[in-house]
Amino acid sequence: MAPKPSSQQGVVLLEALIGILIFSLGVLALVAMQAVSISNVSNARYRTEAAFLANEIISEIWVDRGAGYANVATYAVSNGSGGNASAQNWVQKVRTLLPGSDVNGPDVAIVTPAAGGRQVTVTIRWKAPDAVAVSNHVAVAFVSDP
């Protein structure tokens, strides 16, 4: 006499398939987390470069301010155009290091506050390859006599 088939047949196969499904979802989640992590590292690099570049032009303006702030106004840049040769070299460096900054050029605005000295506002814009919106970094410094 042949043994009667058990109602438990195929349970191990079903459990194995469910286990493989759960493992596959975990691997897909890890791959997605890795992609987000790479994107965040790239964005952090762009923000760091922008901060460094803003500090660079502010430092150059500070050193080359001249007597009575005569040279400060020559660094004014609007959407990547204008400014003296040093400012234009700086704009080229911004365009080289930050993606999308050729379309969204940097600005260097010079204002004379009532208290004296000069207020320098540097705005750097870029658009990362995977970004939807344009990012920016704004640095404000006061250039005064030592």
Image (tube, grey):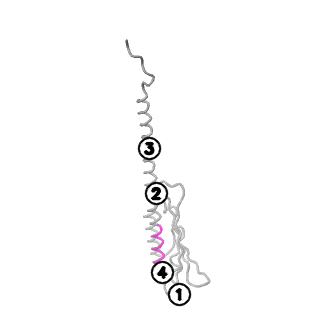
Q: Nearer the viewer, mark 2 or mark 3?
A: 3
Label 1 belongs to which residue? 68
Using the image as rendered, state which of residue 45 and residue 108 is in the foreground: 45
Using the image as rendered, state which of residue 37 and residue 143 is in the foreground: 37
Quadrant into which the N terminus falls: top left
Q: In this view, does 140 lie to the left or right of 63?
A: right
Q: Which mark is residue 62?
A: 4
Label 3 belongs to which residue? 26
Region in magenta: 50-61
**Residue 116: x percent and y percent?**
58, 85
Are the residues at dot 1 and dot 3 in contact (C-beta closer than 8 Å)? Answer: no
Q: Which of marks 1 and 2 is in front?
A: 2
Q: Which mark is residue 92?
A: none
Residue 68 forms part of the magenta stretch? no
Query: Residues under labels 1 and 4: Cα distance?
Result: 12 Å
Query: Residues under labels 2 and 3: Cα distance?
Result: 21 Å
Q: Tag 3: residue type? A: Gly
Are the residues at dot 4 and dot 3 in contact (C-beta closer than 8 Å)? Answer: no
Using the image as rendered, state which of residue 126 and residue 48 is in the foreground: 48
Q: Quick one: SS at disc 4?
A: helix
Q: Disc 1 or 3, which lies upstream in sequence?
A: 3
Are the residues at dot 4 and dot 2 in contact (C-beta closer than 8 Å)? Answer: no
Label 2 belongs to which residue? 40
Q: Disc 2 or 3, which lies upstream in sequence?
A: 3
Q: Badge 1: few (under 14), some or many (20 or more) residues near its Cα, within 10 Å?
A: few
Quadrant of res 93: bottom left
Q: Badge 2: few (under 14), some or many (20 or more) residues near its Cα, within 10 Å?
A: few
